[in-house]
Image (tube, helix red, strand yellow):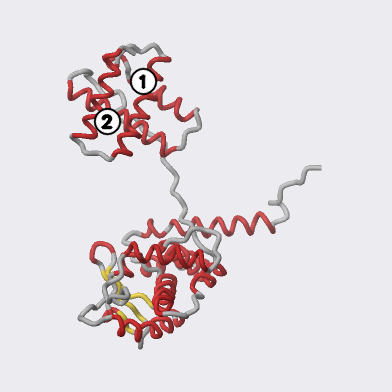
Amino acid sequence: MRDEAVTQVDCFLRHMEAERRLSVHTVAAYRHDVRRLRSFCDERAIDGWRHLDVHAARAFAAGLRRSGLAARSIQRALSAARAFYRYLLREGTVRTNPFAGLAAPKAGKRLPKTLNTEQVTLLVSVAAADPLALRDRAMLELFYSSGLRLSELVQLDLPHLNLQQGLVRVAGKGGKTREVPVGRFALDAIRHWLPQRAAWVGGAEAALFVTRRGRRLGPRSVQQRVRLWARRQGLDTQVHPHMLRHSFATHVLESSGDLRAIQELLGHADISTTQIYTHLDFQHLARVYDASHPRARRKRRG
């Protein structure tokens, strides 16, 4: 391509960074994708952005698919090309956007990572040897017992907890509240934590989980404590708070098969969000089928 076309790419990237205020990482991704498009034009002897038509745009997308690029990467490359041509249109360099309306392959949903029951049992079996361990065990038990989001756990106040009835009132997404049951192990861990909490809280702090200084515990601190206990308990996988929520949903589904109940417990507005866990359950069933059905087993090579 001519130097003029290369300069237009540089101007576009500066526009995205300065005027659109995109992050450095996003601009770097756009730079990579537009350079990929420029290489495609060079290979096709397309001399200038105005000479790239709809047929060439489709050929570019098809080439990305043939190269084995992941669906998400193809989506990003086509998104960068559309944005670049919108900029060229605004500048009067081209008359049409050949990438407008060009469909990218749908990316498959990423299945959430979960812990099995043995791993969860190991994680929450924190020896209550000091005040921090008392607090952290109560947090871990409550995460898994009630399937809470990280934001929901750190927002919990003492009045939200009903120890007698074994319920906790949760403020979910969009300000919607729900009541979810708390298991006996979590209730027991919370009861052991509350006297220590009272010793740390000197003022009117209402948070259920607090720091040594008596202040509400923040999300980042909770994430760090979960990772810390996963290492201490000998788990060979990286654990984050949401993994306990996923594990809760998966284990309840495997036991009950009641997707609607799980939707209510998790606070999902749409059942389609909850249906991701049916894929996890199906994977488990598929493994059992492959391992046990006489006509599902693959023949061994001789």
Q: Residue at x 34, y 62 (%)?
A: 220
Count neighbours of disc 1 (C-alpha within 10 A) and say few if under 14, some if 14 to 19, many if 20 or more. many
Furthest toward the right, the residue is 302
Label 2 secondary element: helix
For the C terminus, give its image quadrant: top right
> In the figure, is residue 226 to the left or right of 20?
right
Image quadrant in which you'd find residue 267:
bottom left
What is the x, y in percent for residue 49?
A: 29, 17
Q: Indicate the amino acid at tag 1.
A: Arg
Count neighbours of disc 2 (C-alpha within 10 A) and say few if under 14, some if 14 to 19, many if 20 or more. some
User: In this figure, which residue is indicated by the disc labeled 2?
Assistant: 83
- Who is closer to the viewer here, 277 or 10? 10
Q: Indicate the amino acid at tag 2.
A: Ala
Q: Nearer the viewer, mark 1 or mark 2?
A: 1
Q: Earlier in the sequence, mark 1 or mark 2?
A: 1
For the N terminus, give its image quadrant: top left
What is the x, y in percent for residue 295?
A: 71, 52
Asked if residue 245 is positioned above or below residue 294 in the image, the reply reads: below
User: In this figure, which residue is indicated by the disc labeled 1?
Assistant: 38
What is the x, y in percent for residue 133?
A: 43, 76
Asked if residue 9 is positioned above or below residue 227 in the image, the reply reads: above
> In the figure, is residue 170 to the left or right of 256?
left
Q: Residue at x 38, y 63 (%)?
A: 223
